[in-house]
Image: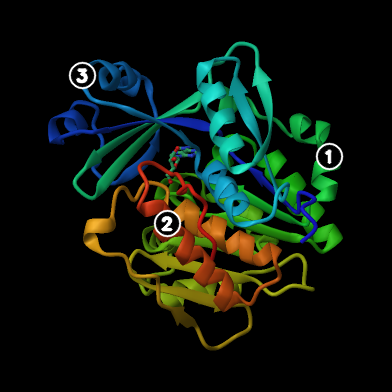
Amino acid sequence: MSGQYEILCLENPLLDIQAVGDEKLLQKYGLKSNDAILAEEKHMGLYEDLFENYKVDLNAGGAAQNTARGAQYVLPADSVVFVGCVGKDKYAEKLVEANKKVGLRAVYRYDDEQPTGRCGVIITGHDRSMCTDLAAANCYKVEHLKENWDLVKQAKIYFVGGYHLTVSVPAILALAEEAAAENKTFMLSLSAPFICQFFKDQLDQTSPYWDYVVGNETEARAFAAAHDLNTEDIPTIAKHMANLPKKNTQRKRTVIVTQGTEPTVIAVQGDDDVKTFPVHVIGKDEIADTTGAGDAFAGGFLAGLAKGESIEKCVDMGSWLAKLSIKELGPAYPFPKQTY
Ligand code: 26A
């Protein structure tokens, strides 16, 4: 590791507005207790409502930005760069601050009109409902990525949050094609069931480029349903995804499906056996907040990839970082820094 921005991450930089809510609040906005959605007109009052009537925590969020902070937390200085679009406002300053804390380099495009995107996170028990108003994050274009093509060229691993499929497929495909052409690593997260369901065509455009694809059991099942696989069996779904057509045949595809506290499932293209790896156990009383646990897993995993570790070790690093993040409020990592 030379600390030369080996990893480049792309997605939506968001500020999380998090509060402990109740059934009434969820009902008022027609939200499910455990979900992630894009805000529609009827959701726009939620943010004010949270500020006025609940005790809110403001956290740096955006799934892939959480992953990027996580990978940088583990790796030597100057290893990770994140790109996305924010507004010229206080929220963006908060994101810059959080990135600084772990030494993540964020190369933001600043939109002139739109404010920084925000994600309302409503906690009820162990569930969290996320409702995102993308705003400036929705303004990212492939042209903006091209303006930073030197950083793209410098990186060896690209990580794209699947949530970005709602924003700029051309930007994602530009990274994917660069990875395939230069035999670099392209990794995508499934992000949420609605991506597999409602952005299936966009997702399918990227699948030939996946060297690594990561998701949880709910997302994997949403993928299976959207593709009429007629199964809910995670190893079967993972194996199917691993063996989808692949553009860069110099690398085999690896599929990683996390299942909360249950073992993580790994399927590798061409392999008959699907493997499982246990997670780092965490005591119930140690759980502060699971928001961003999956993002942290991906961050630890990415750090392992950048260090050239085995798949077993990458999964273990992911699980280790997820555990650290679960002990924090919001999608954050502990200080003083812990080492793997
Ligand atoms: C486009 N959408 C819906 C989103 C998101 C999102 N990040 C990017 N795009 N919806 C929720 N998140 C982020 O997920 C993290 C937890 O995994 C939240 O910002 C939160 O930090």
Q: Vertically, is 132 above or below 89?
A: below
Q: Nearer the viewer, residue 293 or 195?
A: 293
- Gap between marks 2 and 1 measured at Cα: 33 Å
Q: Nearer the viewer, mark 3 or mark 2?
A: 2
Q: Nearer the viewer, residue 6 or 214?
A: 6
Q: Is residue 19 left or right of residue 181?
A: left
Which residue occupies 50% across, 21% down?
91
Query: Is the residue indicated by label 2 positioned so its CB lies within 8 Å of ligand 1?
Result: no
Snapshot quadrant of residue 267: bottom right
Kindly identify which residue carries mark 2: 324
Q: What is the number of the mark on residue 100?
A: none
Q: Vertically, is 156 above or below 86?
A: below
Asked whether the viewer can see residue 82, the reply is: yes
Q: Nearer the viewer, residue 245 or 3?
A: 3
Kindly identify which residue carries mark 1: 149
> As shown in the figure, which amino acid type bears the numbered disc 2?
Leu
Kindly identify which residue carries mark 3: 53
